[in-house]
Image (tube, rainbow, N blue to C red):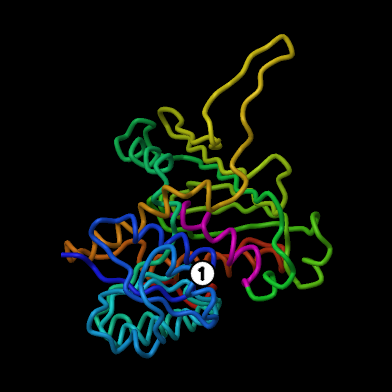
């Protein structure tokens, strides 16, 4: 059975997901909704479908699932709308910037018994999945410490910063989810430090561009995260997991995995310089996983609860930065279910 999708939001991430649907033999793109007709038509010309309104998509009988790629402040309302209309839902992170709003949204999802998957694409990166497999197979023993380095090539414009929720809810939230995914335990305490070293305009908006975070579980396992909005050498994405019997690491990726040696020394090709190229395979894999969940009628993962837990960590980290102290996760609106 081919699953019929509607895409909400024809921006750059919408194009990534539309490409993934078009490339999946068990899925088809039926409809596209966007506030800007030209954007929708451009995407349709590349990947198919027809332009429809959000209300028409909600009422449609020829659509099984929706991909929500609209601005963050629309996510929760759209999730509720399509949960009530009986559509399966894939939504880009975060569900909302407010913990309370996310909880109320997930209550609707539960009441309607709707399927909801959150777009934490890094869980589907083949390199990180191989790392996870090595951990689960016991090759490095019990996890003791994790180091995650995540640095963007450059900062987004101030207009984006204003609506994104800031570095912790927009950028670091991926790392918070990866920490939970790899540790296999919930975070109990966070402590963080953040600065404005890249662009003073970011600081004027009340945000940060350089941060270090330590997440600790109840058993004492730690994950140290280093974030920066500036990496002059490319998109820096590395993870190292240290265990009782050894270590597993995932290094930076390049378009070509070669090394050149001459009398002048050793050189390698540059790193990928954008998340949409570095994680292209991960985006395709997460849509394939969503299709598989729907076909097999299994629980979607990452779930809405995963989205909530990552947001609660982000809130705790922000509080730690503002108050200069360690913060218990339970301080942030209670623990996620």
Could you say where residue 265 lies in the image, as x and y percent from the top left?
A: 70, 15
The residue most toward the front is 45
Q: Is residue 16 above or below residue 333?
A: above
The answer to whether residue 179 is left or right of residue 264 is left
The answer to whether residue 70 is left or right of residue 66 is right
Number of other residues with Cα within 10 Å of mark 1, as a class: few under 14, some 14 to 19, many 20 or more? many
Please say whether residue 123 is visible from this viewpoint: yes
The residue stretch that appears in magenta: 164-180
Please say whether residue 182 is visible from this viewpoint: no
Could you say where residue 154 lies in the image, as x and y percent from the top left?
A: 71, 53
Q: Is residue 46 above or below residue 64?
A: above
Between residues 217 and 40, which one lies in front from this camera angle?
Answer: 40
**Numbered disc total:** 1
The answer to whether residue 215 is left or right of residue 212 is left
Could you say where residue 147 lies in the image, as x and y percent from the top left?
A: 55, 42
Could you say where residue 171 lies in the image, as x and y percent from the top left?
A: 59, 60
Report the quarter where the C terminus lies: bottom left
Q: Which residue is the site of mark 1?
A: 312
Residue at image position (37%, 80%) is: 106
């Amino acid at each position: 059975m081919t699953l019929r999708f509607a895409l909400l939001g024809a921006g750059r991430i919408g194009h990534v997901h539309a490409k993934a649907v078009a490339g999946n033999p068990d899925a088809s793109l039926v409809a596209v909704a966007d506030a800007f007709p030209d954007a929708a038509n451009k995407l349709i010309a590349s990947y198919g479908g027809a332009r429809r309104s959000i209300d028409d998509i909600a009422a449609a009988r020829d659509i099984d699932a929706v991909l929500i790629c609209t601005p963050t402040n629309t996510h929760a309302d759209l999730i509720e709308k399509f949960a009530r209309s009986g559509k399966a839902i894939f939504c880009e992170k975060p569900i909302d910037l407010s913990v309370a709003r996310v909880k109320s949204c997930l209550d609707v999802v539960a009441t309607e018994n709707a399927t909801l998957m959150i777009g934490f694409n890094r869980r589907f990166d083949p390199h990180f999945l191989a790392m996870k497999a090595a951990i689960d197979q016991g090759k490095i023993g019990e996890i003791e410490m994790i180091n995650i380095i995540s640095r963007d090539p450059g900062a987004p414009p101030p207009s984006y910063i204003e609506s994104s929720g800031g570095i912790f809810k927009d950028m670091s939230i991926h790392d918070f989810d990866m920490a939970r995914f790899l540790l296999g335990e919930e975070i109990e305490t966070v402590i963080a430090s953040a600065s404005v070293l890249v662009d003073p305009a970011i600081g004027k908006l009340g945000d940060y561009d350089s941060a270090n975070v330590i997440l600790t579980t109840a058993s004492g396992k730690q994950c140290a995260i280093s974030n920066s909005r500036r990496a002059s050498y490319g998109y820096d994405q590395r993870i190292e997991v240290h265990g009782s019997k050894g270590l597993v690491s995932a290094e930076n990726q390049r378009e070509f995995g070669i090394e050149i040696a001459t009398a002048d020394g050793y050189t390698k090709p540059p790193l990928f310089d954008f998340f949409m190229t570095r994680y292209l395979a991960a985006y395709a894999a997460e849509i394939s996983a969503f299709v598989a969940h729907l076909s097999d009628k299994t629980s979607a993962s990452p779930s809405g609860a995963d989205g909530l837990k990552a947001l609660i960590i982000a809130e705790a980290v922000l509080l730690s930065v503002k108050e200069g102290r360690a913060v218990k996760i339970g301080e942030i609106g209670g623990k996620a279910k």
